[in-house]
Amino acid sequence: MFKRILIANRGEIACRVIRTCRRLGVETVAVYSQADANAQHVRLADRAWPIGGPRPADSYLRGDAILEVARETGAEAIHPGYGFLSENAAFARACGEAGIVFIGPKPESIEAMGSKAEAKALMERHEVPLVPGYHGDNQDTEHLAEQARATGFPLMIKAAAGGGGKGMRIVREEADFADALGAAQREAQSGFGDARVILERYVEQPRHIEFQVFGDSHGHVIHLNERECSAQRRYQKVLEETPSPFLDATRRAAMGQAAVNAARAVDYVGAGTVEFIVGADGDFYFMEMNTRLQVEHPVTELTLGLDLVEWQLRVAAGEALPATQDDIHAQGHAIEVRLYAEDPEQNFLPGSGRLTRLALPSPSAHVRLDGGVIEGDTVTIFYDPMIAKLIVHDADRPRALQRLRQALAECDIVGPKSNISFLERLARHPAIVEATINTGYLDAHLDEFLPTPDAELPATALVLAAAALLQADESNARQLGAATDPHSPWSRADGWRIGHAGKRVLALVYRGQRHEIEAHGHDGHYRVISGACECVIDDLSVQCGLLRARIDGIGHRLPLVIDGDRVRLQYQDQRYVFERAPAFAWGGAEDAADERISAPMPGRIVLVRAKPGDQVKEGDELLVMEAMKMELSLKAPRDGEVAEIQASEGDFVEADAVLVRLADAETEAA
């Protein structure tokens, strides 16, 4: 076993590798960018070295700088994690030339499978089923258009040199091909330094099922069962689970053998994943092989009782696989979701900022958390905004889903917006519960997983939140009053008045909407009125994160979090977050329509599609910017004339920077 390794990555996966190394007594060396100087992986590692600026190209993609740190620190091996240099054959080869072990497959295996086009050609020679399409070297635009017509529509454009959903587009009509191709090529170039693409016939209502494979340098290759990743949005995995509810024993055996054959075809060593697209009829086709550890590997670990990072280290150190195929027996069901700093209601716009509150469930035999940040840390604009992976395990799928729902209910994130509410809806949706979801379902039915913009707040949830706020006020006031005169009526916060129980007016903001509530009563007994809703609350108490009360005679017990002026409660399987507002507020006239298009977050302008004087329609794309490894389309908010463009292609812009101004509507009319 190695004495010291360097981890050429950051965030959650770097912390994950450090935990295993610490258990095995292996010293760890972290590297970090300027943006990560105080990051969690830097704090956890035995040593940490700076390697450059905040952008990946200036730090985590600098193989030369990372190798220099490895030499300086005496690291015997480098674990690349996933992303960045994990599937870079040139870096793997440079490690070998420097006498440092690359904890991953041989450079030749990465080269064979790192290019989707070359991998498909290889699989074709080994008679692995392939989806019809084009994976040739000719990347001329006209030639690709001809191949698209020959393949037929709908088709999928995919980056030849990468994964993770980057550089992928579905094209349903020939007229849309050119624009989709350009966008895919730009994303591919930005994400992987290679603009080449492949074309595939798009399989309608497909499932995504992948097999974990492992090989050693002694000629042994096995698979560690499958993971189903069919819940996807824009080709990004949202929920992963094992075993797949779709596979039976016969199909599992056939796909597992195909995965092993694919790995053997490239003399594979280490951890890898062979991904298949599976049609509704059960036919499966090779998609690609990821020559690295996958983000979703914990579900495999929980069902098999293994540590795949430990296996990686042992295999890289020259040991044989610690198990044979006959030793692999799964127990129970595991599910993983990813907690992201993003806003699902704003097209999943990535977020950034300080995590002022990060409350996650306590790890247990049924719940695992793999994270790269803690409360007080900052989610930066330069990298993937994942906060943590939440993984649950239980005896069967229904129980695992219930574990997931319970664990999500315990999650609370304040700072950048998060996708927790989206995941809660996902975990209860019939397509997940009944295991019928396919890779296109989320994109086609996204409204089913998001709150309706004009939906009314359930009245009962509103009055409960008001009562919870009132109780919090009472508790705070009593603590203050106890230091003076506990018998004084002025130490009470129950609206004490001479001759009557008094009235309190509360104001809450929910999803940007202000609600005013009248509360009459004291000592846990109230009559609460909000608009047309009125109810009587008795025996109200808040203890150990639970609100207990009788509402119009019906008992309720609800999870509740009170954090300053913020109240969160779970009611009827929904999450409600309220913020206290001043009880009395003046409302002025609404502002006129905004004439500006601003940057929603820091990023780089990659396309400018308009110029001053252009007449545009509402929804027309005016600019395209790249931020947090994705492209964002900035569109005209109304019909009008472009008055000013304040950014050029290649410019790096800050959040809220004004990029386009439209002419004043009155000026245009004149």
Image (cartoon, helix red, strand yellow):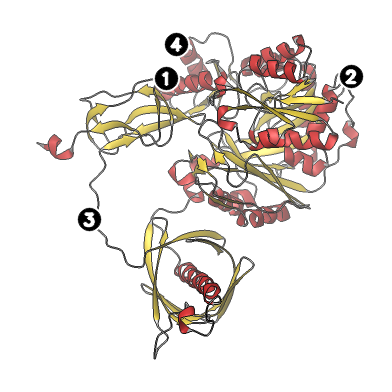
Q: Is residue 197 above or below residue 460?
A: above
First of labels 3, 1 by sequence position: 1
Task: Assign the N terminus to one quadrant of the image.
Answer: top right
Q: CA distance from mark 3 to mark 1?
A: 46 Å
First of labels 4, 3 by sequence position: 4
Look at discs 2 and 1 and give the one toward the viewer. 2
Quick one: label 1, few (<14), some, or many (20+) residues within 10 Å? Answer: some
First of labels 4, 1 by sequence position: 4
First of labels 2, 1 by sequence position: 1
**Residue linked to disc 1:** 178
Task: Assign the C terminus to one quadrant of the image.
Answer: top left
Pointer 4 with pointer 3, Cβ within 8 A: no
Look at discs 3 and 1 and give the one toward the viewer. 3
**Residue linked to disc 3:** 589
At x 73% / y 17%, what residue is drawn? 72
- The part of the image, by quadrant, that contains residue 274 is top right
User: Residue 619: x and y, percent?
Assistant: 32, 35
**Residue linked to disc 2:** 218
State the SS at label 1. Answer: helix
Q: CA distance from mark 4 to mark 3?
A: 55 Å
Q: Looking at this rendering, what residue extends furthest in the left direction?
A: 670
User: Residue 497: x and y, percent?
Assistant: 40, 85
**Residue linked to disc 4:** 142
Disc 3 marks a residue whose amino acid type is Ala
Look at discs 2 and 3 and give the one toward the viewer. 3
Pointer 2 with pointer 1, Cβ within 8 A: no
